[in-house]
Amino acid sequence: MSRRASDRLIPRAVHPGAWWLWALGLAAAASATTNPLILLLIIAVAAVVVRARRTDAPWARSFVVFLKLGLVVILIRVVAQTVFGATTPGTVLLELPQIPLPAWAAGVTLGGPITDRALMDALIDGLRLATVLGGIGAANALANPKRLLASAPAALYEVGVAVVVALSFAPAMVGSVQRIRRARRLRGRPDRGPRSLLGVAMPVLEDALERSLALAAAMDSRGYGRRASVPIAARRRTIALTITGLVGLLLGMYGLLDATGPAWLGLPVLTLGVGLAVGGLATAGRGVQRSRYRPDPWRSPEWVTVTGGLVLAAAVIGTGMVDPGALRPTPLPLLALPLPPAIAIGLLVAAVPAVLTPPPPGMVAPAPRPAVVAPEAPTTEPSAAGTR
């Protein structure tokens, strides 16, 4: 058996950085379009991959929570457009009482006619943000936050701790709410609805404080925040490289986004900024003393995962350069929404990690189907008269 085939068959966790890069590709593709068909297909791709590669860990349930948060975002966007949105041409669906506002609030209306075009624009804007949240939720559900911290560069270890703690807040809160609801059900108390809100909120807050104290004690026992002695000249060189690299990154991104700027301000300055920033991080990492225990490998499944997200983002951005109308079509009628072939191929490639990545340890197995038992044939017993 070849090494590539064994990478797909042997159960192991995919590198968390690969999942985050894949999810960022999905989020970048969603932020570049207002086509509802493409946005819904991106959510479907994320759902398929999460269902195929999620584990039974507490953070694996965060994808559904982020989808529910996306529904709340859509609702808020529609309500804001209905109450405070400007009048948009279209077929009037509902006429609300309009309240006059002072002159300094020009451009903002309170009430008034609600058109189909304004309602559809609000739905699409909310759906785009919900799709971005779905991509982030997929990364939270698939990537182990502790392994992500272990994979951070040495220079970004302290920043990585803060980022990982922030990213693990939502999965930890989901697990805490589920444990508390299970305990309330066992005690015969309501675990859903407004009546149980206070009964669930206080234990969740107490659990969060306990986790914070335990995390602080663990970080102190492992020597977090202690740095090696670095000469002043090396510190200044590191600071100069890092700041110059970040400035180069900003100028290079500006040159790429601004088509009227000079050619040397785009990709050359961006490449120079990346090189200087990497050099600054490499020199800064010498002042951090930490050990790595069983680092996650980066092999062909990780490259497949990252490629899936990048191909989808490149397909959407490239289609926007060639055919901008396909990414921002007229929302009405919905049956006329286009799906360019390049984006369709990108969506298929983005779903490949559901098949070509190894199954993680502790993967949630699908529920077994109930066995269909064939009815037994009726047996004809001899009558009492025949036996005599």
Image (cartoon, rainbow, N blue to C red):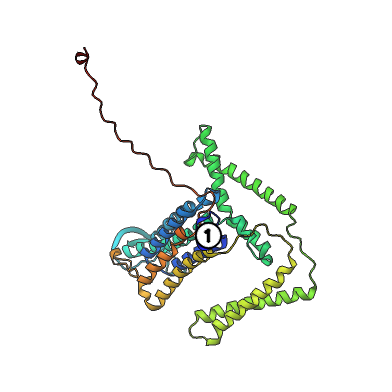
- Report the side of 3 relative to 47 (left or right): right
Image quarter of residue 336: bottom left
Q: Position of residue 196 (x, y in %)?
A: 51, 39
At label 1, counting other C-alpha atoms closer than 10 Å, the crowd grade (few under 14, some 14-19, many 20 or more) is some
Q: Position of residue 247 (x, y in %)?
A: 62, 78
Q: Is residue 256 visible?
A: yes
How many circles with numbers are drawn on the protein? 1
Q: Secondary structure at mark 1?
A: helix
Farthest top residue? 388
Farthest front residue? 388
Q: Is residue 99 visible?
A: no
Amino acid at circle 1:
Asp
- Identify the image quadrant of the C terminus: top left
Q: Position of residue 326 (x, y in %)?
A: 35, 72
Farthest left residue? 385
Along the viewing direction, whichever of 86 and 162 lies nearer the viewer: 162
* Location of residue 191 with respect to 228 vertically, above or below: above
- Report the side of 246 relative to 283 (left or right): left
Residue beneath the point at 67% across and 75% down: 279
Q: Position of residue 242 (x, y in %)?
A: 67, 75
**Residue assigned mark 1:** 7
Image quarter of residue 372: top left
* Location of residue 25 with respect to 169 vertically, above or below: below
